[in-house]
Amino acid sequence: MAEIELIMPKMGESVAEATITNWLKSEGDSIEAEEPVLEIATDKVDSEIPAPETGILKKILFQVDDVVKVGEVIAIIEVEGVARSSSPITIEEKAPQAVQEIQNSPTTVLTEELTKNSPSGKFLSPLVRSISEKEGISGSELDLIKGTGLNDRITKDDLVLYIESRGKANSKAPQAVLTPKSAPAVVASKPQQVISMGEGDEIIQMDRMRKMISDHMIMSVNTSAHVTSFVEADVTEMVMWRNKVKNSYQQREGEKITFTPIIMEAVAKAIKEMPMINVSVSGDTIIKRKHINLGMATALPSGNLIVPVIKDADQMNLVGLSKKVNDLANRARNNKLSPDEVSGGTFTVTNVGTFGNVMGTPIINQPQVAIMAIGAIRKKPAVIETSFGDTIGVRHMMFLSLSYDHRVVDGSLGGSFVQRVAKILEDFDLNREV
C-alpha cells in the first residue's frame, strides 16, 4: 500500500482559500475515485472535493470550519501502487482566532448537551456545538439562526455573528449602531450611522453572501468613476424570430431558448469590434483581455445575486450560448456551481427586465470596467422610417444601459458600445436558421 495527498485544489484565479464545511467520509472509510470526500465553501460558492483515486481515507488533517489555503494537503489517502509523495506532513492544530476569543471570554455554560442535529434536524458541526454549549445557546435557539452553509448549515461565522448581535440585544448600554428611540446616541470611535429602533422593528443579520455582495459593491463604487449611458432599441425582429422558432427549438433541443443568449451573442460581437471595453485597470496600467468571458448576473431564490461566467462566449454559436445560459442559470439557483464558474469574467450583463424594470444603473463588477443592464421588452408606438415616408406602428422596444469606468472608458467609447449592441439587435435576421 502507498499514500497519496488530497490537495485543496485551485478554484478560480481569485480564490486563495476555502473553509471546510463538512467531511463526507471518516478516517478508515473506503472511497472510490471521483467520490466526494468533503464539502468546502469559498467566498463565492459551496463545492465538493472528490477523491483522486480509489483507496482508504487514512488521515484527516483539517477539521470542519478550518480555513485551508489552495495547495495545502487536507488528507492522506492510502492506495494501491506507488506513493506520489513520501515527504512527511506536519499540521499544527490551532483553533481559529475568532473561536479562541469566544473560548477565552466569560460565558454561561449550557447544561444541555447538544447532539449532532438540532431539534428540527439541522446539522450541527462539532465546533458549532462546542461554541454553543460554552455560550449557553440551546438547540432550539440554534434553530432560529439562518445558516449560510450548504443545505442551510450553521457555520462558525453565522454563530459568531449571532453571538455578537445577541450580546448587543441583551446589553442595557446604548449601542452605537442600533439604539432605541429613548436611548441617547453614542458616538463610536469609528464613524457609523446611528439607526433608531421603532416598536415592532426586526433585526435581520446579513448572510455570508449578502455581506460579500455589500463589501464588493462598496469597493466598486469607491474604485471606479461610474458613468451610465442609455439607448432604446427596437427589438421587434428579434422578438418575432424567437416567437417563430421557440417551439421547434424546444422540441429539437429539449430546452427553451430565451432572449438572454441572443443578447449575449450581440454583446460578444460588439466587444470584438471594440476590445477596449474588455479591459481591467491595475494602478496606472490597463490590462486588455484576450478572452471574452461574459458574466451573467443571476438572482437566487434567497434574494441574493451570483454571477456565473460564460467563458469565451465569442467562440460559441447561438445554440451553444443558449445551452450554456440555461445550464449556468439552473445550477446557480440550485447552488451547484463550481468556484471556477463564477470567476474570470471580463464583462457582465444583468437583466433588470426580469423584475419588470425598464432600465437600470448597475454597479460595475470589479475588476471589470463595464456592465450592461437589459430592460423589459415592451410594446410601444414608435416612428417607423420607410422609403415612402414615416409612419407610426406598434413595436417591441427595450432600453439598454451601460455603466462604465470613466477612468479608462470615455463617453465616446461607452456610448458607441451600447449603441452598437442595440444596432446588432435591431438588425436581427428574421430568416435566420438555428
Image (tube, grey):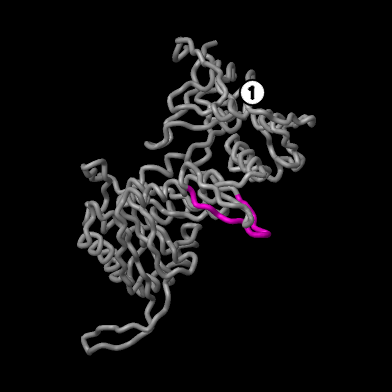
Task: Report the side of 63 relative to 369 (left or right).
Answer: right
Q: Quadrant of the C terminus?
A: bottom left
- In this view, the residue in front, 66 or 151, is 66
Three-letter amino acid code of the residue under disc 1: Ser
* Residue stretch in magenta: 192-204
Identify the residue at image location x=47%, y=54%: 298
- Residue 36 visible in the picture: no
Q: Position of residue 75 (x, y in %)?
A: 54, 20
Residue 288 against residue 22 in the figure, above or below: below
Identify the main secondary structure in magenta. loop
Q: Secondary structure at mark 1?
A: loop
Identify the residue at image location x=34%, y=56%: 371
Identify the residue at image location x=57%, y=37%: 157
Q: Residues within 10 Å of mark 1 (few under 14, many from 20)?
A: some
* 203 part of magenta stretch: yes
Residue 120 against residue 93 in the figure, above or below: below
Q: Position of residue 170 (x, y in %)?
A: 68, 43
* 8 part of magenta stretch: no
Q: Position of residue 339 (x, y in %)?
A: 45, 39
Q: Quadrant of the N terminus?
A: top right
User: Mark 1 = which residue?
Assistant: 26
- In this view, the residue in front, 380 or 43, is 43
